Amino acid sequence: MSRLPLSLLPETATVQQDGSLAIGGCDVAELAAEFGTPLFIYDEAHLRARCREAVATFGLGNAVYATKAFLCTAMARLAYDEGMLLDVASGGELFVARRAGVPAGSLVMHGNNKSLDELRMAIVEGVRHIVVDSFDELDRLDALHAEGLPRPNVVARITPGLHVHTHEFIATGQDDSKFGFNLGNGSAMKAIDRMRRSPSMVLRGVHCHIGSNVFEAANFAKAAELMAGFAIPLDLPELVLGGGLGVAYVEGEEASTITQWGNVLLDACAALGVTSTVSVEPGRSIVASAAITVYTVGTMKELPGIRTYISVDGGMSDNPRPVLYGSGYEAFLPREVVAERPMSARLVGKHCESGDVLVLDAALPADVKVGDLLATPVTGAYGHSMASNYNKLTRPPVLFVRDGAARVVVRRETYEDLVQCDVE
Ligand code: LLP
């Protein structure tokens, strides 16, 4: 019977007099009528507030937005305007950030398998630093230096051997990982020795990222401790502690704020005697709860004694997280945000497979009907960025809303877009 916890909605969300939802001063039903569904609606004030919070907590130059969580030209500009640096993890992300006008000096380059071309691009553009992930990458950096390219600043990605409680697919700090130089088997020290002596690069610091959607502060304090133990004797100017702060997706979940997370990390580093600059790379905690996805209910199938299926006009192509990680979401009707939700239904998409689930057991108002707008909150991170064209669905548009105005920052794809790369 629970109602939607309003804390899951973007910061400027309001319940209007008739019980319906507005975000950024814009009526959600009107936005859906004008721009169609499915539709990603981002609260611009919320995005800016989270960026500012990260910069205020960690200091200018020490808060790096992980663009993989959500990237488009407008988002790259927004994060940069608010004082964040940007983490790009592929040539494509680097391209989008540069095309948006973000100076290369405000970008850091990531990736466990950067190609020679991607590394060349990062060096030629002049990124702030490259986070080096492997011995093979060191070979490639040597080859690029031999080509005559300048020496890039580099940071070594260390895998500290720390298990955290999150989905296996997004845990990255444990020994059994494709990422980084392992601390436990001596690779980290070997890599540091090589990087220090190398004429091809300038070693600036060490980095770790223990995983994503991590809730327990103790995990971050432990990572800081392991990394401080390794980094302090090296006496390098930078220590990067990655991203990973979890966010609340469903009723009953509670996450730390960016400020609280920062206090845990910075206090731990100070207590351990870290004198390097400490920086972080939050993605999810900047963008996740800034957005909702709005769908239209298309079909309802009631199976007495089994369950009711409610199908919407999107699905695993705009939000693959439930099928990939078993992630939970809430669902609600924008026309009556605070209604009781006594009905239980399986919220599914329109793709041709049974795995196309958005919410396994969604609580919904009993009067939900075909034609209703239905929304899922907290879809701002790893939704649009992991969207696909499965079944040749066109990817939804993205709106930024603010002070009563909406702007399209990513337009809806068209059928023509679907054949743009096809060669006849
Ligand atoms: N830094 C590095 C090196 C990373 O690999 C990541 C995320 C971040 C920072 C940002 O982490 P965040 O603050 O967003 O947790 N698709 C998955 C999440 C994958 C995370 C990949 N790396 C999901 O939807 O849960």
Image (cartoon, rainbow, N blue to C red):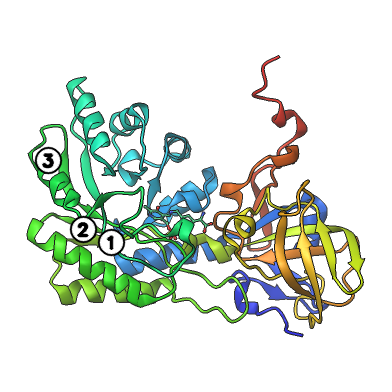
The quadrant in which residue 151 appears is top left
Disc nearer the start of the sequence (1/3): 1
Q: Nearer the viewer, residue 40 or 304?
A: 304
Observer-side mark, 2 or 3, equals: 2
- In the displayed structure image, the side of residue 343 where residue 192 appears, left or right: left
The quadrant in which residue 130 appears is top left
Image x and y of residue 165, in percent: 43, 70
Amino acid under label 3?
Arg
The quadrant in which residue 118 appears is top left
Q: Residue at x 48, y 38 (%)?
A: 96
Disc nearer the start of the sequence (2/1): 1
The residue tagged 1 is 161
Disc nearer the start of the sequence (2/3): 2
- In the displayed structure image, the side of residue 223 where residue 67 appears, left or right: right
- Tag 2 and tag 1, C-beta contact below 8 Å: yes
Kind of element beneath mark 2 = loop
Residue at mark 1: C-beta within 8 A of ligand 1: no
Quick one: label 3, few (<14), some, or many (20+) residues within 10 Å? Answer: few
